[in-house]
Image: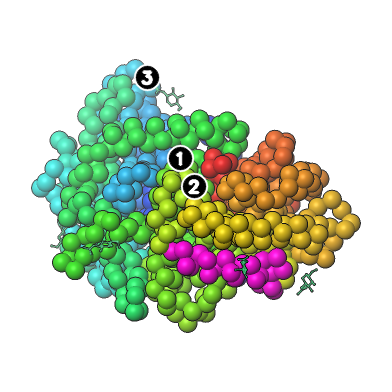
Amino acid sequence: MRSWIYASSLVLATVVQAITWTATPFNPASIPLAVRTPYLSAWLPQGTGAALNQAWPTFWTGSTLGWAGFVKVDGTNYAFLGIPAVSGTTFSQAVQRSSVFTSTQSIFVLSAGPVNITVTFLSPVEPTDLVKQSIPFSYLSVSAAATDGKSHTVQVYSDISAEWVSGDNSLTVNWNSTTSESVLTHQVQLSSPSVFTENSDHTQYGSAFYSTTNTVGATYQTGSDVSVRAQFLNNGKLANTLDTGFRAISNNWPVFGLAHDLGTITTATAPVVFSVGHIRDPAIQYIVAGGALQSRSLYFLSSFSTPAAVISSFLGDYSAALSRANTFDAKVQTDASKISADYASIVALSIRQAFSATELTISKTSTGAFNTTDVILFMKEISSDGNVNTVDVIFPAWPIFLYTNPALGKYLLEGLFRYQASGQYPNKWSVHDLGSSYPKALGHNDGLDEKMPVEESGNMIIMALSYAQKTGDLAHLQRYTALLDQWTQFLIEDSLLPGDQISTDDFAGSLANQTNLAIKGIVGIGAMAQIESLLGNTAKSTNYSSIATSYVTQWQKFATSTTGAHLTLSYGSAASWGLSYNLYADKLLKLNLFPAAVYSEQTAWYASHANAFGVPLDTRHTYTKSDWQVWTAAIVSTTAVRDLLIGGVKKFVSDGQTNVPFSDLYDTISGADVGFRARPVVGGHLALLAL
Ligand SMILES: *[C@@H]1O[C@H](CO)[C@@H](O)[C@H](O)[C@H]1NC(C)=O
Ligand SMILES: *[C@@H]1O[C@H](CO)[C@@H](O)[C@H](O)[C@H]1NC(C)=O
Ligand SMILES: *[C@@H]1O[C@H](CO)[C@@H](O)[C@H](O)[C@H]1NC(C)=O
Ligand SMILES: *[C@@H]1O[C@H](CO)[C@@H](O)[C@H](O)[C@H]1NC(C)=O
Ligand SMILES: *[C@@H]1O[C@H](CO)[C@@H](O)[C@H](O)[C@H]1NC(C)=O
């Protein structure tokens, strides 16, 4: 991650409404709507009480994504999504009755006169199906049910704006639609795209798609926001006309509308389903041997040759996708509820966010065919930086991959291993990331990447062993033994007395002799002992094992405070302390290098040093990290302290002081968000499920 944080975070200045609906499990700062990739990331900035029709959906950065919805019931109009203004028409606000989020869905019930409408946003999480996981689409479904037992006529409308294709609304877009097939699709893109480029974190090439099944009574229209929405509000259907006056995103705001006539309804209808997505190809530029740049494509393109084919399959799969999602949600809920209800709610809110930072890619063979045996998973370091596959961002997120499908972890590490094995990276420690700006994984052949030598070397060895332990697959340990051993030599030099350097918590500043960083390095050496053992290299294994053991003994003397029963933040600084979350790796890998007394002493210390929103990261600041608190919760010796740490995170993300996607950095005294948002490190909230 990078060494600065936002100067000030968004604090809601306006007076917020009291929540008048039932929120299950709670009202989070921001609710995921369509959250699947770094570029398909639409949220409801909920704060302390914005209903689905009291705010525009926003991109994770906070910029607006036009996404509107109306229903007409017995001729009366109600808005249910977004805050469109349409002069010359009348409509009321549907009244939100409930909101629910699960790991994959956000479900809202709103009453529109005598009808309840259920609006479901499903962002599939398909960890074991690489084709489905890589399809950059989400579902919006709407169903209606009378609340008075009588019959009512219902029409449903929704549109997106062109804000889904750029970070700059002054840019010109063009669009076209398919209207004669079994699926109605609108497609929109920049007129002058720029491959592998971003603008304000939005991608600047590829196309957005808004689609629905072309059933009887389905209508479509493109045109200015006011004209298309007014057409529906006045007529209950669209005009089936297409605007061809291509123009800037904000010039009479072109929108891409779709409508369905549900006819006369009483009991709950089958839902009408819309899909929203964004496809770009190639997706990633990746440095390979000799500095050549490889263009990589999203995995799903190996199964679908056109956008129309994938959209048709995606829409047709809705019922099955919903059923798989319900199964996945139920499993996560069951597993996480064994810890606590607070924990289950934090995990559910984290899953779409963590997966949406990642994209599964494949390369092509020399004949141009897709090579599905060459899989690399890319991750964007969202919000703190735009780096590609940052090792110390993959590391905190690691538990989500171990829990859902460890192979995804292998695919995340593969890009890093392969680049460093190509010999182009000059340093003896592990690289920090694969490239400064997503989606360009251009490496750091100058060796001038953000320097976190002990952090990243330890992380790589720990994650490599962890994957092998979970799966029994030793192929990458065999292929990359030389690199792993090179990093181990560095850890042997620099982890008992780590030189002045930053850790993953770079924003907190650099320090020599960091206690927690030393733990990382020592666990890394201990992990390499296990790797050598798995590879049959007994002598090396014994040697590294004894080095790790002897380091632990020496470390305990350096790292224990002389004035209190706790570990220090750095050696010799008796009053300092911090969250020693790197001990989690010792438990995860079952090395048990560090004595139980260290855990129980730290547990007691956290219990007596918690603020209202949890335990500070360390004595330099009052802020903390949600991921490291949950990692710590996974290894403390009492359930009381475990629940205290988890409770602090829950209290923060439900306190209504911010409206951004789950921030992992916040103040433990005030509960204010300190600046990060939407980062994949929330995958670390699954730490208790991965043990
Ligand atoms: C309408 O929605 C409310 C709130 O979710 C619910 O309590 C009620 O049972 C619903 N009515 C019908 C008929 O579905
Ligand atoms: C838009 O036009 C392009 C180029 O002709 C075509 O490939 C694409 O399928 C069209 N999109 C839709 C949604 O019809
Ligand atoms: C496909 O990728 C794998 C893994 O990188 C590689 O070993 C293999 O040679 C590739 N196949 C072709 C036909 O290029
Ligand atoms: C690190 O700790 C060791 C052992 O206490 C000490 O000798 C050394 O001076 C420290 N290094 C720095 C830079 O403070
Ligand atoms: C153990 O490993 C260290 C670091 O690689 C090396 O210097 C030392 O010679 C090794 N000892 C034995 C007995 O192999």
Depth check, front residue: 539 or 468: 539
The 10 Å Cα crowd at callout 3, few under 14, some 14 to 19, many 20 or more, is few
Q: Sort mark 2 into few (<14), some (14-19) or many (20+) by Cα contacts within 10 Å.
A: some
The correct choice, above or below, for 449 with respect to 613 in the image is below
The magenta segment: 480-502
Q: Earlier in the sequence, mark 3 or mark 2?
A: 3
Secondary structure beneath label 3:
loop
Q: Is residue 483 magenta?
A: yes
Q: Which mark is residue 103?
A: 1
- In reply to whether residue 230 is colored magenta, the answer given is no
Residue 468: x and y in percent read: 46, 50
Residue at mark 2 = 469
User: Residue pushed farthest front?
Assistant: 539
Secondary structure at badge 1 equals loop
- Looking at the picture, tell me which residue is in the foreground, 346 or 87: 346
Q: Earlier in the sequence, mark 1 or mark 2?
A: 1
Q: Quadrant of residue 93?
A: top left
Instruction: Name the spot of residue 501 as percent of width and height, x first.
Output: 66, 72
Q: Quadrant of residue 666?
A: bottom right
